[in-house]
Image (tube, rainbow, N blue to C red):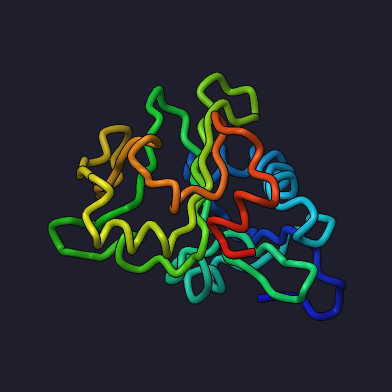
């Protein structure tokens, strides 16, 4: 997915150029820049400088990274390695992490809970439409998978009540994650190198 014709940027986002009129896509796009700035801040001193958007067609999107692997963003590090990230921007009063469970529960069409291959998972809340995040959390997804398997995270299931979407989702509170899972969080001190070393092994 990287464009080898240009030098890598620290934060590279996949942008769909086809018509995406779902309100979630529209609202998410308005917050791309602030999210990219936050990632740069969290990984300051580790990732390359800069931000760019990699445009793909709707067909490429359906056949590629986000739909089947759950990848929205690449974080490119100074050592030449990369991490992949999925992000979710929410606007409700809750303070939970939600993950799509079944796209269609009746047909058992698997969602991100089963299919996601991103290494990091970001959830940010903009409840007051300030185009910033009042609460957010960045998770080490492999650690979440392992802690869930060990029954250290209590997930619940809920259907989508906002619109006509068929999907249901798993959710748990920010406070429900063990320290091993949390890379950075809005109501905790800035992560700094020590915390990143503990959670990601840097």
Look at the image and tell me whether residue 17 can be seen.
no
Residue appearing at x 73%, y 58% in the figure:
11
Residue 134 visible to an observer of this rendering: yes
Taking the view exactly as shown, the residue that stands out farthest to the bottom is 4
Could you say where residue 147 lies in the image, as x and y percent from the top left? 32, 57
Quadrant in the picture for residue 197 = bottom right
Residue 45 drawn above or below residue 27: below
The foreground one among 15 and 9 is: 9
- State which quarter of the image contains the N terminus: bottom right
Q: Relative to 165, is 14 on the left or the right?
A: right
**Viewer-nearest residue: 151 or 197:** 197
**Extreme top residue here?**
128
Quadrant, the C terminus: bottom right
Q: Determine whether 134 is above or below 23 in the image.
A: above
Q: Residue at 59% of width from left, 31% of height from top?
A: 133
The front one of 179 and 18 is: 179
Numbered circles on residues, count? 0
Measured as percent of width and height from the top left, residue 187 is found at 54, 29
Please report the residue visible at 81 percent of the width from the left and 62 percent of the height from the top: 48
Q: Is residue 179 above or below residue 8?
A: above
Q: Position of residue 77 (x, y in %)?
A: 74, 67
> Residue 68 is drawn in which quadrant?
bottom left
Residue 68 is left or right of residue 73, and the answer is: left
Query: Relative to 136, is 38 on the left or the right?
Result: right
Name the residue located 58 percent from the left edge and 23 percent from the top edge.
129
């Amino acid at each position: 997915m990287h464009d080898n014709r240009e030098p890598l940027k620290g934060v590279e986002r996949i942008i769909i150029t086809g018509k995406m009129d779902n309100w979630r896509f529209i609202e998410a796009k308005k917050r791309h820049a602030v999210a990219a700035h936050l990632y740069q801040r969290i990984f300051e001193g580790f990732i390359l400088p800069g931000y760019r958007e990699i445009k793909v067609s709707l067909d490429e999107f359906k056949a590629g990274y986000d739909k089947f692997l759950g990848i929205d963003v690449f974080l490119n590090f100074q050592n030449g390695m990369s991490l992949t990230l999925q992000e979710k921007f929410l606007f409700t009063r809750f303070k939970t992490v939600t993950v799509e469970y079944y796209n269609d529960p009746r047909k058992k069409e698997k969602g991100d809970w089963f299919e996601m291959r991103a290494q990091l998972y970001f959830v940010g809340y903009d409840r007051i439409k300030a185009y910033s995040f009042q609460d957010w959390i960045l998770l080490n997804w492999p650690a979440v998978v392992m802690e869930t398997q060990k029954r250290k995270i209590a997930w619940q299931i809920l259907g989508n009540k906002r619109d006509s979407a068929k999907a249901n989702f798993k959710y748990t509170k920010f406070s429900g994650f063990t320290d091993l899972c949390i890379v950075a969080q809005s109501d905790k001190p800035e992560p700094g190198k020590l915390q990143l070393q503990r959670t990601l092994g840097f």
